[in-house]
Image (spheres, rainbow, N blue to C red):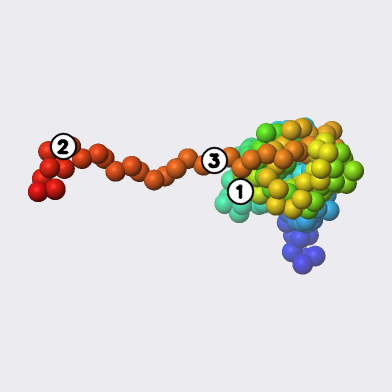
Amino acid sequence: MAEWFSNLELLSKIYWLTAIIGSIVFSVVMIMAFTGGDADDIDADVEAGFQFISFKNLVGFFTIFGWSGIACIDAGLSTPATIIISTICGLLMMVIMAALFYFISKLSDSGTLNYKNALDAVGEVYLTIGADRSKMGKVSISVQGSMRELDALTDSLTPLKTGTIIKVLDVTSNGILIVDQTRKPIEASTVQNEPLLSNNTQKKISN
């Protein structure tokens, strides 16, 4: 291995070192990013939005830069062509990675619960709520397209027991719902009325 490396030209050595080191660091960074080990870095990316220059993107650049350069050398391309092509490939990799983490952050944002979306929603008491905010309970309510069990309080002078139909009146700053008893909304009837028979038709049926 050492003999093979020592026989390479200087440009080939540079590309091989870049490719190998970049691949190792790239693998570690990606594993940490998608397993939560790099949570602070991901949070920074989410807050910054679309971020072209970052540590992860630079690692991706050097990884693809190295391997594309090796491919160009093996294809017999000239040194200027090899450098230009490998640089373009590395920049494209940076764009792809920046876009990838940008869309991941957007998906994360869309899945975050916004308690204000629960205002005026109708649900059902899951765990009894104490009267006059004396005891916190839970309600089962549909928010952002899915059923959730959320903490709730009430200003009602009587407890809201399990199974009581409630409506969300307000949301506190720390995400606790303020609810009160209400009626279950009446769903539109799906029964179709039969068309009235004309007088002539009724006479024929009676005859």
Q: Is residue 114 visible?
A: no
Image quadrant where residue 45 sits: top right
**Residue positioned 67% across, 34% down in the render:** 120
For badge 2, the amino acid type reads Asn
Instruction: Decide which of 202, 18 is in the foreground and name it.
Output: 202
For badge 1, the amino acid type reads Cys
User: Disc 3 or disc 1, which is closer to the eye?
Assistant: 3
Q: Position of residue 136 (x, y in %)?
A: 85, 46
| Residue bearing mark 3 | 186
| 13 relative position to 77: left or right | right
Instruction: Decide which of 128, 72 is in the foreground and name it.
Output: 128
For badge 3, the amino acid type reads Ile
Quadrant of the snapshot with the N terminus? bottom right
Q: Earlier in the sequence, mark 3 or mark 1?
A: 1
| Residue bearing mark 2 | 199
User: Disc 1 or disc 2, which is closer to the eye?
Assistant: 2
**Residue positioned 74% across, 33% down in the render:** 169
CA separation in Å, label 2 and label 3? 35 Å
Q: Earlier in the sequence, mark 2 or mark 3?
A: 3
- Residue 77 lies, with reference to residue 5, above or below; the image says above
